Image (cartoon, rainbow, N blue to C red):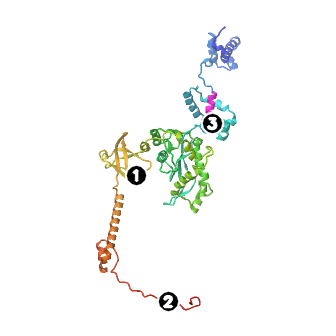
């Protein structure tokens, strides 16, 4: 009895029997090979190969594709559970990308790999209602009936979510009179729901605005209503250009922050900061004049008035401090202020070097050395070392909050020098000269006024002219004396004694 492993494979055995039967039938059947091939549905080359293989050993008729050892591509239960959780968090992500992420996790966790075709078949085999719940972003039902993969955080600053949005309020520029919608960037702690920082912008924010917000959120603040500070453990944002910029990523690497980006089209990955924006709309913006959600909101804003833009930052800050942070959160069962003070002892990275952390937020700006100085905006910075490198290009490390009096100049990855701001430019010189002249004139007027008390009236005009004060004062004359007027009152019944 032959114990070859091919006979334990039903498909391989059936192929051998079928091929041997075709060869025997051809040999016993009269007629040409062309007619037999047309009747059997074979090509003449295939029949020739079968006859040649049948002359030898029976194993020559075995199809190697039936017996070759394949890699395991079956989709296990752990694969399905992981893929459900992933698609529940990112409903719009393609299944091919989800398969790549699954194989990366499988390699790390020691699971067998899975092919995209096998995963697609297994995913399509799921009940239609479950697939629709996953893909249609109806996560409320899914979260109650299926396991959802979430990153559980138990301490403050363990995970921070950041995002930007256009404010739903029409504002007016007090200088130009333009009516526009400002932008807003926000950072929220996912554990305590504390708003670490919110900035309102005149225009669409850029990466420098993100650095400014991060610096404000991490460093200690002078506002006693906002006692939170500390270096974040990780942060999650979307794939906006302002967040994936190299300047922001470089800063987070220096600070040791794990910087994550959610897949495109998956706004639910930043659910907490998105709900924060929704809270602003329902509890603040809808009650303000110029709310953009009303019909003909722009026309009403132009005709009836909009919110002055300089007031928007104060309005938002006041709402956060007096309403959002002190109101009980539905998921926490307490206010964000209470949650922070209760769990702040669990936070990491509260003790850090403030100077080094502040310098990590600096971003490079390319500049060219000309006449021993570099020009950034309307300000110039000079240093004796810069005069030796005229015409070369360098990078100036600028603070996101604005240019300081002293900046670091870098060339080739090394510090070239520290440049000081040149305060002797033309505009400042003019202003200082005007101030100096005004002070001199004021002092001369005071001196002239104190000298007038003992000077005869005929020399007043001459004295004022000598001290350099122009005046139209003429020689003083003695005023005429005004005689008092007497009024006679006729006696009546009311004023009789």
Whichever of callouts 1 and 3 sits on the residue coming sooner in the sequence is 3
Residue 462 appears left or right of 496:
left
Residue named by callout 1: 377
In the image, residue 231 above or below residue 300: above
Residue named by callout 3: 148
**Element marked by disc 3:** loop
Q: Nearer the viewer, residue 10 or 455?
A: 455
**The C terminus - image quarter:** bottom right
Residue 150 can be seen, yes or no = yes
- State which mark lies toward you, 3 or 2: 2
Q: Residue at x 38, y 52 (%)?
A: 379
Q: Residue at x 70, y 19 (%)?
A: 39
- State which mark lies toward you, 1 or 3: 3
Residue 10 appears left or right of 175:
right
**Element marked by disc 2:** loop
CA separation in Å, label 3 and label 2: 99 Å
Dots 2 and 1: beta carbons under 8 Å?
Answer: no
């Amino acid at each position: 009895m032959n114990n070859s492993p091919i006979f334990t494979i039903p498909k391989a055995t059936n192929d051998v029997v079928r091929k041997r039967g075709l060869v025997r039938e051809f040999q016993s059947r009269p007629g040409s090979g062309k007619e037999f091939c047309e009747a059997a549905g074979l090509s003449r080359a295939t029949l020739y190969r079968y006859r040649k293989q049948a002359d030898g050993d029976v194993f020559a008729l075995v199809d190697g594709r039936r017996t070759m050892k394949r890699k395991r591509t079956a989709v296990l239960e752990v694969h399905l559970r992981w893929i459900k959780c992933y698609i529940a968090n990112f409903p719009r992500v393609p299944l091919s990308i989800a398969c790549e992420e699954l194989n990366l996790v499988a390699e790390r966790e020691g699971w067998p790999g899975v092919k995209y075709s096998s995963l697609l078949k297994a995913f399509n085999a799921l009940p239609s209602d479950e697939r629709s719940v996953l893909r249609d972003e109806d996560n409320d039902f899914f979260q109650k009936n299926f396991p959802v993969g979430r990153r559980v955080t138990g301490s403050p600053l363990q995970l921070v979510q950041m995002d930007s949005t256009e404010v739903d309020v029409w504002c007016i520029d007090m200088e130009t009179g333009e009516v526009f919608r400002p932008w807003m960037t926000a950072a929220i702690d996912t554990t305590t729901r504390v708003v670490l920082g919110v900035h309102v912008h005149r225009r669409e924010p850029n990466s420098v605005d993100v650095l400014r917000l991060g610096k404000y959120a991490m460093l200690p603040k002078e506002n006693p209503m906002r006692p939170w500070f500390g270096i974040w453990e990780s942060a999650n944002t979307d794939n906006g250009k302002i967040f994936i910029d190299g300047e922001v990523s470089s800063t987070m690497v220096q600070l040791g922050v794990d910087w994550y980006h959610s897949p495109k089209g998956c706004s639910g990955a930043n659910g907490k900061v998105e709900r924060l924006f929704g809270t602003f709309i329902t509890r603040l913006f809808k009650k303000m004049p110029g709310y953009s959600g009303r019909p003909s909101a722009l026309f009403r804003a132009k005709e009836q008035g909009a919110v002055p833009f300089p007031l928007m930052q104060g309005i938002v800050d006041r709402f956060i401090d007096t309403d959002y942070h002190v109101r009980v959160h539905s998921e926490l069962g307490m206010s964000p202020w209470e949650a922070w003070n209760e769990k702040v002892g669990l936070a990491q990275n509260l003790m850090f070097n403030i100077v080094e952390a502040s310098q990590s937020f600096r971003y490079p700006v390319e500049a060219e050395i000309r006449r021993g100085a570099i020009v950034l905006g309307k300000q110039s910075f000079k240093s004796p070392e810069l005069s030796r490198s005229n015409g070369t290009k360098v990078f100036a490390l600028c603070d996101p909050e604005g240019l300081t009096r002293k900046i670091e100049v870098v060339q080739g990855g090394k510090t070239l020098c520290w440049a000081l701001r040149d305060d002797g430019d033309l505009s400042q010189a003019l202003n200082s000269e005007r101030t100096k002249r005004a002070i001199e004139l004021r002092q001369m007027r005071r001196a002239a006024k104190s000298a007038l008390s003992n000077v005869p009236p005929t020399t007043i005009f001459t004295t004022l002219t000598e001290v350099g004060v122009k005046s139209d004062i003429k020689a003083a004359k003695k005023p005429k004396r005004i005689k008092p007027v007497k009024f006679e009152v006729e006696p009546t019944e009311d004023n009789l004694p």
